[in-house]
């Protein structure tokens, strides 16, 4: 069993925005923390893999997307896998003595179809709709310290050193 994953180091608060918190089931002020990620195999760090920003609810402290009903990306990734199986099946059809081509082609297409259906189900879009309805922050005032924020393409509070994002 290969244990490949990411270590995440040195979180730093870099931004804030209004976001839908799944745990609170309400729009909340969230802060974005940036982590330095390092790819590791078992316990051996292999290579730096860049930065990732995660959003945390300022009310409950959980990640805002934690336990989100459906993560579309994963469904579409699975659907891509189904299409790959179907493509291999289609390639196998060229060999007349290979009986598995049709099975792979049909089951791959069925898998892709089911996953695309699941990804577009209401549970996924209800989250997207509710998140789209969250009122964005006023970018002229820092929500953390109430100081005025200089306008610009990336409004930033100079005392907190955070970016004020409009979603
Ligand atoms: Zn919350
Ligand atoms: Zn501030």
Image: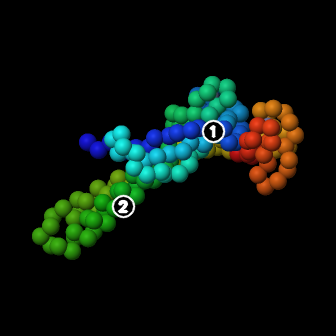
Q: Name the residue under label 1.
A: 12
Q: Which of marks 1 and 2 is nearer the N terminus?
A: 1
Check the picture and name the quadrant holding the C terminus.
top right
Q: Which mark is residue 40?
A: none
Which image quadrant shows ligand 2?
top right
Q: Indicate which disc residue 83 carries.
A: 2
The answer to whether residue 165 is left or right of residue 46 is right
Separation (CA) of disc 1 from disc 2: 40 Å
What x and y, as percent, mark residue 28?
69, 32
Residue 64 in sight from this viewpoint: no
Vertical relation: 51 (above or below) 68 = below
Secondary-structure class at tag 1? strand
Look at the picture and state if 90 lies above or below 25.
below
Disc 2, SS: helix
For the N terminus, the quadrant is top left
Residue drawn at (40%, 49%), measured in percent from left and top?
46
Q: Which residue reaches farthest right?
A: 148
The residue located at (36%, 39%) in the rendering is 43
Q: Quadrant of residue 65?
A: top right
Across and down, in percent, residue 37 comes to: 50, 45
Place of residue 3 in the rendered image (x, y in percent of width and height, measured from the top left): 32, 42
């Amino acid at each position: 069993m290969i244990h490949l994953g990411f270590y995440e180091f040195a979180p730093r608060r870099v931004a804030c925005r209004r976001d839908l918190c799944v745990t609170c089931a309400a729009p909340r002020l969230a802060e974005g923390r940036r982590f330095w990620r390092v790819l590791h195999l078992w316990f051996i760090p292999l290579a730096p893999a860049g930065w990732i920003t995660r959003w945390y609810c300022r009310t409950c402290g959980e990640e805002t997307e934690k336990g989100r009903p459906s993560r579309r990306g994963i469904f579409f990734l699975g659907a891509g896998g189904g299409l790959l199986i179907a493509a291999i099946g289609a390639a196998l059809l060229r060999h007349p003595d290979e009986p598995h081509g049709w099975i792979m082609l049909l089951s791959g297409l069925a898998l892709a179809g089911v996953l695309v259906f699941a990804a577009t189900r209401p549970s996924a879009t209800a989250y997207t709709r509710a998140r789209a309805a969250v009122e964005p922050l006023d970018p002229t005032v820092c929500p953390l310290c109430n100081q005025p924020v200089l306008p610009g393409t990336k409004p930033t509070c100079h005392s907190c050193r955070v970016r004020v994002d409009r979603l």
